[in-house]
Image (spheres, rainbow, N blue to C red):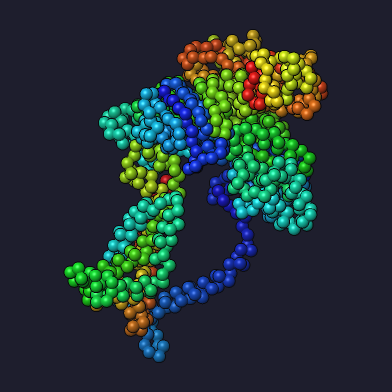
């Protein structure tokens, strides 16, 4: 049961909100829409659900053109960022509401609600009202209501964004389990790259109304097609710097360079942009930094040490680099420190933003 | 962004209302336009006169006087009711058991039928037996609203303020309740005085609500009829003959449909124009 | 700048608190050094915002005292305490320009215009707002407005403590890290005492030198990020800090040897005899669990990719044990053995560290 968007465009009052987009979502597993706020993720989800009609293009589901089918007649469920529940109904009634609309017989209704409640650990709370529940419990109620319907398409719009950090982690672990044996297309919108990676499945990076890349999450992460995708899929943001390829060398500055061999040998001479994720920039004294990595020195501007890792910002010729490493490394602001770049894993982009070479998977 | 899938069925549901409105509003309006360009004689005889009534009206001193009186009245009303309403709303508690009590007290004047309001104040202000009238005279103030134009105006304004300030209070109160506590806390930390808090936090946040309040009070006071009519009948003389009262006198008193229709239309256009000006001025900042 | 001390503090929102649960903040004593960057970390409802409001003066504590340096400020209102507070969502005076917003606290205190101007420009440059000084504050983005809120606190040179109440809540995720780094930079440059309240451990651990972890109104542990990470004194701290949190496994103690499911486990500090009947657990973070040729036999359940490393979920009987492996490390297919790093394995009795 897969959802396909065919050349879908959305224009509102002369402004194009969604540029021509075609994508075929995976039938099972999570389809993640990853992008910054206002990139168009919610709009895309509304188009998929049928809440919005595209200005041009078609929406196909399970081999049928459903563009003109109103959302009421599609089997869609949606979960929002703000825990949306019927405030005057108990948790049981909330979960049961879509079944009551479909006039499911009472015994079947009770058993289906019971099963879902158990899956989401809500059995003890069935008599309470949403106002009496914690944030995490309210969101689980909303999820339960979405799941009980056995919908063909389940849309989750940043459902964990309003929850405490730890709760988010817990629910994120549970979600794939909840959908594991269901036969439906799941679309999940998020702004955090780490969430996309942990949920796995397929990812579509969205930026300014377009899907820049769609594929298996790991692939999109490691082989972005362009700079925009690489940027969207990096937290902390990816380090970028202009480099020059001259003959068989790649030069970052006059003193920092490395041989252009292997996959880089075939590139034409000229200027490129190097993209290096922060964990590929390590303090030189860290054991993780290997001998064959390229050394570089810079002035430390900010040192953020959390318990398990260190994020250090340093400047090289006016450009700020960010290094992320395991363990606690003391750095004084203003000191000149040595770092090493794992350029073997670097991404190279041509001046127009296209990726011309990605590191080994 | 909220675009909805267009649903043609909605038109069918709306059709009965459209027909009703057409009968109740559009057709009478067209009738009035019709009358305004014709002269009537008894026996339903009509003669087309063009813009004669409009010209007469614009040049009529009687109309000018009524218009001046109306503008003065509306001006005074707005100048009193808006600040007073805001001040009362600021003084009302926002939390606790007294909130409901205050809200009910504020709502009560709005629930009284308008002609009853007029009648109430009429009796209240009677110089010989009314509580207010008698007390004022007993204190040495020579007060008789049936004979003195100034007293009539004062009573009229007092009545309207008593009747309608509550509306401004309730609207302003709703606007104030929407301001999150953090703003007050931040102002406290910044060392802002109460005046600064009012000027920089409360007033800007109430702007939208106040726009509605001003607009409503302007339109209502400009078209006011029942209360002043019951209170003073337009008197003494024509001291409190506001536009609508004048209009009714012409239309029903003298059965001069032509001039009355013309005056109605001009009246309507004035209200429309002034409302539009008010609205544009008060919301022009929102476009930023 | 001031040293902040809380003595015997307790607070309840009820007039007549009876049970333990009625107290939002249970008895605590805390001290924060002058000029330090501190965090109050805990889940929703743990009392951290209540504590923040007590320190800032927006709330009067039911019991106890608040001291700034040698002054007892318990009864003083916020404007008399010389504090600055940045709220969850930006509070700016919409009708004023950015310049006027920043100047507002100074003007209210009657500072001379020349001094006001110098100070405002200095802080604006620090916050990268100097290009926008003439713009209307209402037109800025969320992070710009938060910077203005922050700027209003920094602009007063006599501020004793700056407090942050989950300030990054409304900031776009891809801008969050930038503002977070900015706050850290500001602390490193200005050296003011700062207290940062959050439920996000990344924010707390990267910003603060000292972190106070709270749960249900009590302080569970206070220490440096490293201490909290490497030696959590309570399983709650182990669970709450770190993503994923610490592995907590049932344990037994007999004849001086700690065992998990029958296998002996070496712990960092030799435990003294724990109280009888206490629930015993060992805690070890996924970062300190490795695959090895021998050790605890497990079945590999699932692997999740987190970019720079992978989270592996394994199972032994009914217990799940998580560990982290690097991007390139080989992954055993089905069954494997786990070793716990001795220096980072602790024994806990009823949740508290037993050593």
Report how many numbered discs are placed on residues in the image: 0
**Residue that appears at 67% across and 30% down:** A197
Residue A176 position, x and y percent, is: 72, 36
Left/right placement of residue A67 relative to residue A303 reads: right
Left/right placement of residue A316 relative to residue B85 reads: right
Residue A33, quarter of the rendered image: top right
Residue C133, quarter of the rendered image: top left
Q: Nearer the viewer, residue C19 or B219?
A: C19
Q: Nearer the viewer, residue C51 or A53?
A: C51
Q: Nearer the viewer, residue C295 or A217?
A: C295
Residue A159, quarter of the rendered image: top right
Residue C248 position, x and y percent, is: 69, 25
**Residue that appears at 42% across and 46% down:** B288
**Residue that appears at 64% across and 63% down:** B9
Residue C257, can we see it? Answer: yes
Residue B93 position, x and y percent, is: 40, 51
Q: Nearer the viewer, residue B34 or B251?
A: B251
Establish if A119 lies above or below B206: above
Q: Residue furthest bottom?
A: B43
Establish if B20 lies above or below A260: below
**Residue that appears at 36% across and 66% down:** B163
Residue B229, can we see it? Answer: no
Residue C238 position, x and y percent, is: 63, 25
Q: Residue furthest right?
A: C334
Left/right placement of residue B267 relative to residue A37 reads: left
């Amino acid at each position: 049961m897969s959802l396909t968007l065919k050349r879908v465009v959305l224009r509102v009052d002369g402004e194009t909100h969604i540029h021509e987009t075609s994508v075929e979502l995976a039938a099972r597993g999570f389809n993640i829409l990853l992008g910054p706020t206002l990139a168009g993720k919610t709009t895309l989800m509304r188009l998929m659900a049928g809440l919005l009609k595209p200005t041009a293009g078609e929406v196909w589901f399970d081999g049928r053109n459903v563009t003109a089918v109103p959302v009421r007649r599609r089997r869609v469920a949606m979960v929002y960022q703000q825990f949306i529940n019927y405030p005057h109904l108990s948790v049981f009634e909330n979960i049961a509401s879509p079944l009551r609309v479909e006039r499911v017989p009472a015994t079947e209704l009770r058993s289906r609600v019971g099963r879902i409640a158990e899956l989401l650990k809500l059995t003890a709370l069935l008599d309470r009202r949403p106002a009496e529940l914690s944030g995490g419990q309210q969101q689980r109620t909303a999820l339960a209501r979405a799941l009980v319907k056995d919908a063909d398409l389940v849309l989750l719009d940043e459902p964990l964004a309003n929850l405490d950090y730890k709760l988010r982690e817990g629910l994120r672990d549970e979600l794939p389990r909840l959908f594991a044996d269901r036969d439906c297309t799941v679309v999940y919108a998020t702004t955090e790259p780490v969430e996309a990676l942990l949920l796995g499945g397929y990812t579509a990076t969205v930026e300014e109304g377009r899907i820049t890349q769609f594929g298996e999450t790991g692939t999109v992460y490691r082989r972005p097609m362009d700079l925009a995708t690489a940027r969207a899929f990096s937290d902390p943001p990816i380090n970028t710097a202009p480099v020059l390829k001259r003959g068989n060398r790649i030069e970052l500055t006059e003193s920092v360079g490395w041989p252009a061999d292997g996959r880089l040998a075939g590139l034409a001479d000229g200027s490129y942009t190097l993209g290096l994720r922060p964990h590929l920039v390590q303090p030189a004294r860290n054991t993780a930094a290997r001998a064959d990595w390229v050394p570089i020195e810079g002035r430390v501007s900010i040192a953020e040490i959390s318990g398990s890792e260190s994020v250090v910002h340093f400047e090289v010729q006016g450009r700020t680099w960010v290094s992320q490493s395991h363990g606690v490394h003391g750095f004084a602001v203003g000191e000149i420190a040595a770092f090493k770049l794992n350029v073997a894993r670097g991404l190279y982009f041509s001046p127009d933003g296209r990726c011309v070479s990605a590191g080994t998977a | 962004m909220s675009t909805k899938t267009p649903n043609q069925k909605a038109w069918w549901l709306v059709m009965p209302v459209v027909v009703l409105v057409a009968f109740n509003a559009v057709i009478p309006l067209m009738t009035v336009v019709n009358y305004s360009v014709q002269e009537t004689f008894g026996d339903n005889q009509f003669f087309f006169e063009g813009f004669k009534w409009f010209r007469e009206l614009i040049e009529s001193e009687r109309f000018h006087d009524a218009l001046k009186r109306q503008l003065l009245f509306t001006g005074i009303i707005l100048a009193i009711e808006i600040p007073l309403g805001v001040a009362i709303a600021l003084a009302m508690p926002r939390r606790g058991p007294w909130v409901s009590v205050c809200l009910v007290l504020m709502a009560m004047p709005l629930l009284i039928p308008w002609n009853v309001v007029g009648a109430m104040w009429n009796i209240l202000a009677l110089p010989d037996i009314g509580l207010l009238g008698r007390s004022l005279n007993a204190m040495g103030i020579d007060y008789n609203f049936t004979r003195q134009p100034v007293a009539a105006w004062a009573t009229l304004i007092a009545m309207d303020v008593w009747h309608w300030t509550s509306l401004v209070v309730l609207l302003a109160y709703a606007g104030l309740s929407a301001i999150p506590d953090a703003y007050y806390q931040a102002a406290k930390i910044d060392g802002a005085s109460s005046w600064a808090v009012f000027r920089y936090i409360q007033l800007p946040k109430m702007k939208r609500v106040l726009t509605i309040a001003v607009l409503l009070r302007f339109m209502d006071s400009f078209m006011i009829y029942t209360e002043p009519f019951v209170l003073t009948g337009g008197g003494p003389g024509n001291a409190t003959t506001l536009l609508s009262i004048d209009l009714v006198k012409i239309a029903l008193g003298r059965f001069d449909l032509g001039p009355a229709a013309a005056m109605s239309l001009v009246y309507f256009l004035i209200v429309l124009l002034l409302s539009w000006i008010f609205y544009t001025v008060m919301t022009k900042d929102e476009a930023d | 700048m001031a040293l902040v001390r809380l003595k015997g503090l307790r607070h309840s929102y009820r007039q007549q608190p009876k049970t333990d649960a009625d107290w939002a903040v249970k008895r605590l004593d805390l001290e924060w050094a002058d000029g330090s960057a501190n965090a109050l970390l805990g889940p929703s409802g743990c009392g951290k915002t209540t504590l923040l409001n007590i320190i800032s003066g927006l709330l009067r504590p039911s019991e106890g005292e608040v001291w700034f340096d040698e002054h007892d400020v318990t009864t003083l209102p916020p404007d008399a305490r010389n504090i600055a507070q940045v709220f969850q969502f930006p509070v700016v005076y919409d009708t004023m320009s950015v310049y006027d917003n920043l100047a507002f606290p100074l003007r209210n205190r009657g500072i001379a215009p020349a001094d006001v101007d110098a100070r405002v420009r200095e802080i604006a440059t620090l916050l990268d707002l100097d290009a926008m000084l003439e713009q209307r504050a209402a037109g800025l983005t969320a992070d710009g407005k938060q910077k203005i809120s922050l700027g209003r606190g920094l602009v007063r040179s006599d501020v004793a403590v700056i407090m942050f109440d989950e300030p990054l809540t409304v900031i776009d995720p891809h801008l969050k890290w930038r503002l977070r780094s900015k706050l850290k930079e500001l602390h490193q440059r200005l050296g003011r005492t700062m207290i940062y309240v959050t439920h996000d451990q990344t924010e707390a651990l990267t910003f603060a030198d000292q972190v106070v972890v709270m749960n249900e109104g009590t302080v569970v542990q206070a220490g440096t990020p490293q201490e909290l990470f490497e030696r959590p004194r309570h399983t709650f701290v182990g669970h709450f800090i770190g993503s994923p949190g610490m592995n907590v496994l049932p344990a037994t103690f007999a004849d001086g040897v700690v065992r998990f499911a029958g296998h002996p486990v070496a712990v960092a500090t030799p435990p003294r005899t724990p109280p009888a009947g206490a629930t015993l657990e060992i805690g070890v973070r996924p970062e300190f669990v490795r695959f090895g040729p021998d050790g605890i036999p497990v079945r590999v359940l699932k692997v999740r990719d987190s970019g720079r490393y992978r989270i592996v979920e394994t199972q032994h009987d009914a217990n799940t044990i998580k560990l982290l492996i690097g991007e390139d490390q080989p992954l055993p297919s089905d069954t494997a053995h786990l070793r716990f790093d001795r220096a980072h394995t602790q024994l806990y009795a009823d949740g508290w560290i037993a050593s």
